[in-house]
Image (tube, rainbow, N blue to C red):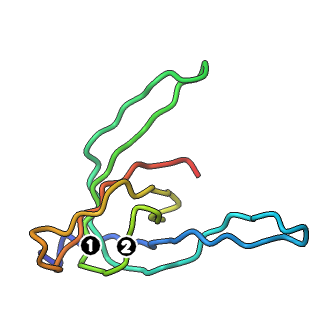
């Protein structure tokens, strides 16, 4: 992996649920790690759902290998959020992870 392509500082977040005084879960996110990454948009589309037009972008995010990154996490970058759809360990060499992500509005 060429270091020059890793030019975006991203935050990988993991879900942490807490409970309020009534015992109800309160969803939240905490920082798992902050790393340099390359972010490449690969697909963009608009679709009509529930009488409103929505757009969806798909991105490929490349980072140096980190153990513990899962599809239950998300990426925060430049005031945008990306849900991790799959985690690929290229050639199973523990050098680089490719995260296939979908941009969300939240």
**Mark 1 residue crowding within 10 angstroms, few (<14) / some (14–19) / many (20+):** many
Mark 1 and mark 2: Cα distance apart in space: 11 Å
Q: What residue is rendered at 48% in x and 65% in y?
A: 76
Residue at far front of view: 23
Residue at far right of view: 22
**Mark 2 residue crowding within 10 angstroms, few (<14) / some (14–19) / many (20+):** many
Query: CB atoms at circles 1 and 2 under 8 Å apart?
Result: yes
Residue at far top of view: 51
Residue linked to disc 1: 63
Tell whether 102 sits left or right of 26. left
Tell whether 37 sits left or right of 34. left
Q: How many marks?
A: 2
Residue linked to disc 2: 69
Residue 20 image point, x, y percent: 84, 70
Residue 58 image point, x, y percent: 34, 45
Residue 103 image point, x, y percent: 44, 49
């Amino acid at each position: 992996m060429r270091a020059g392509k890793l030019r975006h500082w991203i935050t990988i977040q993991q879900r942490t649920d807490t409970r309020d005084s009534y015992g109800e879960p309160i969803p939240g996110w905490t920082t798992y790690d902050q790393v340099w990454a390359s972010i490449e948009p690969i697909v963009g589309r608009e679709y009509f759902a529930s009488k409103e037009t929505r757009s969806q972008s798909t991105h490929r995010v490349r980072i140096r290998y980190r153990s513990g990154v899962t599809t239950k996490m998300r990426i925060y970058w430049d005031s945008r959020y990306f849900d991790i759809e799959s985690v690929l360990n290229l050639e199973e060499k523990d050098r680089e992870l490719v995260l296939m992500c979908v941009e969300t509005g939240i």
